[in-house]
Image (cartoon, rainbow, N blue to C red):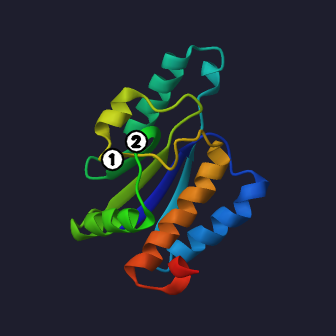
Amino acid sequence: MKIQFWSVGKAHENYVKEGIDLFTKRIAHYYPVEWKLIATPKALASANVNEVKKAEGEKILQLLKPEDALFVLDERGKEFTSDGLANLIQAKANESIKNLVFLIGGAYGTDKMILQRASLQWSLSKLVLPHQLVRLILAEQVYRACTILRNEKYHHC
């Protein structure tokens, strides 16, 4: 199984890039992993929120393969413990899923067509967090889940 992190928005900011790179490299010891940054179409800068979300959603649907498992990060999604996330990842690996995609939506959230396509809507927190920090937290939590599955000590520090 390959883990893919997709995020709508600009490149990683320097203040989080080092951490994202560190945890991505660590995850690679367990699963192939990659980041895909999806730019918001510039022509939509003056569009309304729904048009922006729809255009981003259409772009995401073009990138998704029918067999991909999609976990969308959404503030209204279900919350999990680190052990619960580890169990979800293991369950997808047991299903022989080729690609597990974690999606961080755009600044206005994720279009309903993407939420309907998702296998899971996951909330990191009830707080609204900056996208850049969500990327770092997501990478760290997936790494933590990997160490839990291997019963390694990182989770217990």
Q: Secondary structure at mark 2?
A: strand
Give the x, y percent position of residue 94.
23, 70
* Lateral position of residue 84 relative to residue 51, left or right: left
- Mark closer to the observer (1, 2): 2
Judged from this view, the residue extending furthest toward the right is: 14
* Lateral position of residue 83 relative to residue 106, left or right: left
Task: Give the residue at mark 1.
Answer: 120
Residue 77, label in figure: 2
Task: Indicate whether 88 appears above or below 71.
Answer: below
Residue at 46% x, 40% y is 74
Q: Quadrant of the N terminus?
A: bottom left
Give the x, y percent position of residue 3.
43, 63
Callouts 1 and 2 close, C-beta under 8 Å: yes
Frontmost residue, 118 versus 55: 118
Q: Secondary structure at mark 1?
A: strand
Residue at 78% x, 55% y is 14
Looking at the rendered structure, the kind of residue marked 2 is Gly
Residue at 58% x, 41% y is 127
For marks 1 and 2, the one nearer the N-term is 2
Cα distance between the residues tagged 1 and 2: 8 Å
Q: Quadrant of the C terminus?
A: bottom right
Give the x, y percent position of residue 93.
29, 69
Label 1 crowd (10 A; few <14 / some 14-19 / many >=20): some
